[in-house]
Image (cartoon, rainbow, N blue to C red):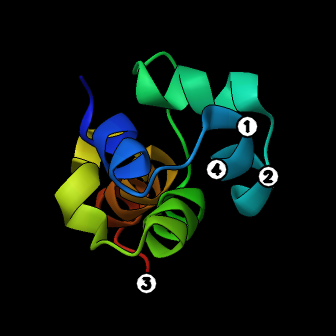
């Protein structure tokens, strides 16, 4: 069981209720919980806030923020700020 799903269940939230609180569909949240979807760091933080947990407690860096990581690497390659 994923840590995201476990955190949701510990609150007693159904998939539908949690998705409504986060502002996404239940299907999309299910895909996040099963690892079928990568999400932005902003959405990961929103989920952590709704679940009242630390971001690092339910997500690993590889599950979110790939775009931000790519931007850092692009900046390093070009020498820009």
Q: Which residue is mark 2?
A: 20
**For the C terminus, which image quadrant?**
bottom left
Picture layout, residue 66 above or below residue 52: above
Residue 80 disc label: none
Residue at (42%, 55%) from the top-left corner? 74
The numbered mark, 3 or 2, whose residue comes first in the sequence reads 2
Residue 63 drawn at (x, y percent): 35, 39
Picture layout, residue 69 above or below residue 25: below
The numbered mark, 3 or 4, whose residue comes first in the sequence reads 4
Q: Mark 1: few, some, or many residues within 10 Å (few <14, many ≥20)?
A: some
Q: Which residue is mark 4?
A: 18
Look at discs 3 and 2 and give the one toward the viewer: 2
Q: Which residue is mark 3?
A: 81
Question: Are discs 4 and 2 less than 8 Å apart at CB?
Answer: yes
In this image, 69 relative to 38: left or right? left
In this image, 53 relative to 46: left or right? left
Residue 41 drawn at (x, y percent): 48, 61
Q: Secondary structure at mark 3?
A: loop
Question: Are discs 4 and 1 less than 8 Å apart at CB?
Answer: yes
Q: Secondary structure at mark 1?
A: helix
């Amino acid at each position: 069981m994923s840590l995201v799903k476990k955190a949701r269940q510990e609150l007693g939230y159904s998939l539908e209720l949690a998705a409504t609180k986060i502002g996404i569909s239940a299907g999309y949240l299910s895909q996040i919980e099963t690892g079928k979807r990568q999400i932005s760091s902003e959405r990961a933080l929103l989920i952590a806030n709704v679940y009242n947990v630390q971001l690092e407690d339910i997500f690993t860096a590889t599950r979110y923020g790939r775009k931000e990581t790519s931007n850092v690497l692009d900046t390093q390659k070009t020498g820009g700020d």
